[in-house]
Image (cartoon, helix red, strand yellow):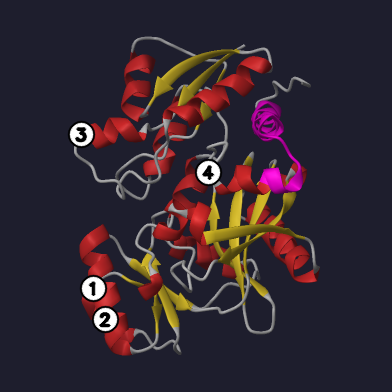
Amino acid sequence: MTVGLTYDLRDDYLREGYSQEETAEFDKPDTIAAIEDVILKNGHATDRIGHVQALTRRLAAGDRWDLVFNIAEGLHGFGREAQVPALLDAYKIPYTFSDPLGQTLTLHKGMTKHVVRDLGIPTPDFVVVSDPEDIDQVSLPYPLFAKPVAEGTGKGITALSKIDNVEDLRNICTNLLNTFHQPVLVETYLSGREFTVGIVGTGKDARTLGAMEVILNPDAEQHAYSYDNKEHYENLVRYAAVDDAEARHAMEISLAAWRGLGLADGGRIDLRSDTRGIPHFIEVNSLAGLNPIRSDLPILCRLMGISYHQLITDILNSALKRAGMLRIC
């Protein structure tokens, strides 16, 4: 079986003049090499395709693959993570991770929270600020937390993201609107523990890999797992595998959200607890980072004693099972 690989290499975009922060979600060569190594060790051939434009050219030229391992994030629009899945759907080529509906929905944190709240899953109260005039309509009690509605890797999140008054709310929202050219999610700030929960599988086959608590060191930006904290996690952040009652509740919530949102194969869900120790859904990473060393999901797996090889194999097998091509490895 030949497995195509679709991805966005960070170096390609840096050479085109995009900034470090603009390309923060994109992958480095060692991530592609690590995934490819696992696929090869599972007995499959691989074919590196690249980003959505390269995929388009290859499809037009008549190239086809038995399955595509897709981690392409895209660059523009709320549908950027859905572009590769939509193209592959058009050519009836199966692929890893969620379909265009799941990828588009979960990239927009506000729309995702509407669905999650309707599922009865706890999530902080929120509003979406689309232009400066909306700021005067925010009536949530302080403190609040603000971030771009459709970014990952902590982009746009700093220590200033925790907001204590209307003046700071106006300043932060205006800055984010001007910087990221997209709406701002404003939600109630929760002061409790922060968790990320790993998940593999789809539907009734989905299962949690465990819960990891994110603990900020004294020198870190406080109040948030921010872009800077993630970029310099070695010195600023401590990770701990946790399995107490609060963590198990976080895992139950995460699995319910994953299944309710109809997501596939694997990813991460981030949560924070309120003052009563009740975890709340914050956001889902349906295309979670897969760098074997630096990304949160592989870090969580290491803490749980799960190898990178097993993680990628489980994701691959979930996609193969959905496509009716499961091979026991």
The residue beneath circle 1 is 174
Cα–Cα span, label 2 and label 4: 34 Å
Q: Amino acid at mark 2?
A: Arg
- Residue at the (40%, 45%) spot, across then down: 25
**Image quadrant assignment for residue 228:** bottom left
Query: Are circles 1 and 2 on residues that touch, CB within 8 Å?
Result: yes
Front-lying residue, 18 or 293: 293
Query: Are circles 4 and 3 on residues that touch, CB within 8 Å?
Result: no
Q: Is residue 173 above or below residue 15?
A: below
The residue beneath circle 3 is 16
Q: Quadrant of the N terminus?
A: top right
Q: Could you say where residue 152 lies in the image, as x and y percent from the top left? A: 43, 53
Residue stretch rendered in magenta on the structure: 301-322
Q: Quadrant of the C terminus?
A: top right
Determine whether, in the image, residue 278 is placed left or right of residue 6. Answer: right
Determine whether, in the image, residue 269 is placed left or right of residue 177. Answer: right
The residue beneath circle 4 is 294
Cα–Cα span, label 4 and label 3: 25 Å
Mark 4 or 3, nearer chain start? 3
Mark 2 or 4, nearer chain start? 2
Q: Secondary structure at mark 4?
A: loop
The residue beneath circle 2 is 170
Mark 3 or 1, nearer chain start? 3
